[in-house]
Image (cartoon, rainbow, N blue to C red):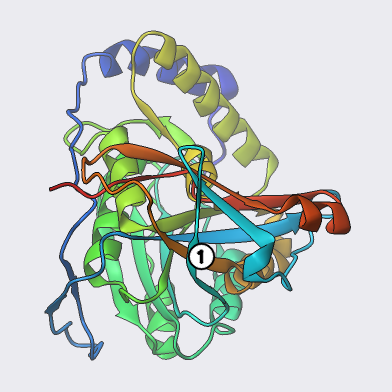
Amino acid sequence: MKRFVPTWKYLSTLLLLVPLLLLIHNSTRVIPQTRERTVGPTRTEANIKTDVIRTDVDLVTVDALVLQKNTARVVGDLKQADFIVQEDGVLQSISHFSQNTLPLSVLLLIDRGGCLDPFGSEVRRAALDALSRLKPTDEIAVMTYHNTAELLQEFTRDRRLIERALNRVPPHDESANHCLNRAFFEAASYMAQAANPEGRRVIVAVTGVTRNFDCADSPSGRAAAQMVYESGSVVCGIIPHTPDQVMENGMIRWATRIGGLAGADSMNIQTLADETGGEILQDKPENLESTFDTLMTHLRTRYSLAFVSTNKKRDGTVRKLKIDVTPATQKSRTKLVVKARKSYIAPRG
């Protein structure tokens, strides 16, 4: 792999791009809450047989991860009565509650652009080991991205197919960009169309760059984020932490902040994780086996809560969610943190 580009040269390139990016104006899409989902019930590996499944669109489902604030340890023994759900400040009645019973649909989204390769041999082994520990009912898909996004493996429960897909991940292209807006739009669109409609949905990005300017000729970052929210996906990230990765990510973060002041659009994976209740985990590449295991443990121990909104208007508005534990539970456990989706778009019509 080539040496990392010197700081001043890489930064000057980014600064030159900022005024050009100000000319890019991507229109945002209005995506309804209600949507027919096309899925493959038999999950044949040659192709996906399609059926149209209609869901109860008024049932709002939320995944919640509960951690001890001081230790970051998972709290996995809570009951339905321990939770409070509010929509726009109004208390909601939880009608469905479960933990570790619904199957997972995990889409692994692997970055192949930029100066550094986040998916080296150590990360590949860590991913294979962690994914092999999922339940037999869980399904996995593999997608890669840089300037474009490519689906390498459709959703499957066959771990051998996943291993083959990870072993044929395209080479890293140092000349390509990190088109996060295209990658997450494509990932969320595929998730909405093909994932198990009864399961929990997770997009796991493996990347060294957590934010970037929107790429042209792609849906805007706002449209991509809206698609992620509409797909019901939780966004998580795995970051192979190295000095060069910190440098590249730091410079892009700085450039996007400066560009943002001038109106250039950008996308931030951390924002997606915060809004969907996900998390970004990072460590040295040689330590990522335990990091992947931690993420899979967190996914398996998340709580699933569902409610029918007291607001019966089908107006397509954004509604704020707040998921918390009861004061009594908070007092008895001492400082719990709940990571969960912060909003949803109401059905329309």
Which is nearer the eye, 126 or 139? Answer: 139
- Residue sitting at x 35%, y 59%: 144
Dot 1, crowdedness within 10 Å: few (<14), some or many (≥20)? Answer: many
Decide if residue 90 is in sight here: yes
Residue 53 against residue 272 in the figure, above or below: below
The residue indicated by pointer 1 is 305
Residue 333 against residue 173 in the figure, above or below: below
- Residue sitting at x 27%, y 15%: 20
Decide if residue 292 is in sight here: no
- Residue sitting at x 41%, y 15%: 259
Quarter where residue 98 is shown: bottom right
State how many labels appear.
1
Residue 329 against residue 181 in the figure, above or below: below
- Residue sitting at x 79%, y 61%: 73
Quarter where residue 242 is shown: top right
Is 157 on the left or on the right of 331, as rendered? left
Which is nearer the eye, 242 or 52? Answer: 52
Give the x, y percent position of residue 101.
53, 82
Give the x, y percent position of residue 341.
49, 50
Give the x, y percent position of residue 72.
78, 55
Is 274 on the left or on the right of 161, as rendered? right
Which is nearer the eye, 340 or 78? Answer: 78
Q: Secondary structure at mark 1?
A: strand
Quarter where residue 51 is shown: bottom left
Give the x, y percent position of residue 184.
34, 49
Which is nearer the eye, 340 or 257? Answer: 340
Residue 163 against residue 152 in the figure, above or below: below
Mark 1 is on which residue type?
A: Leu
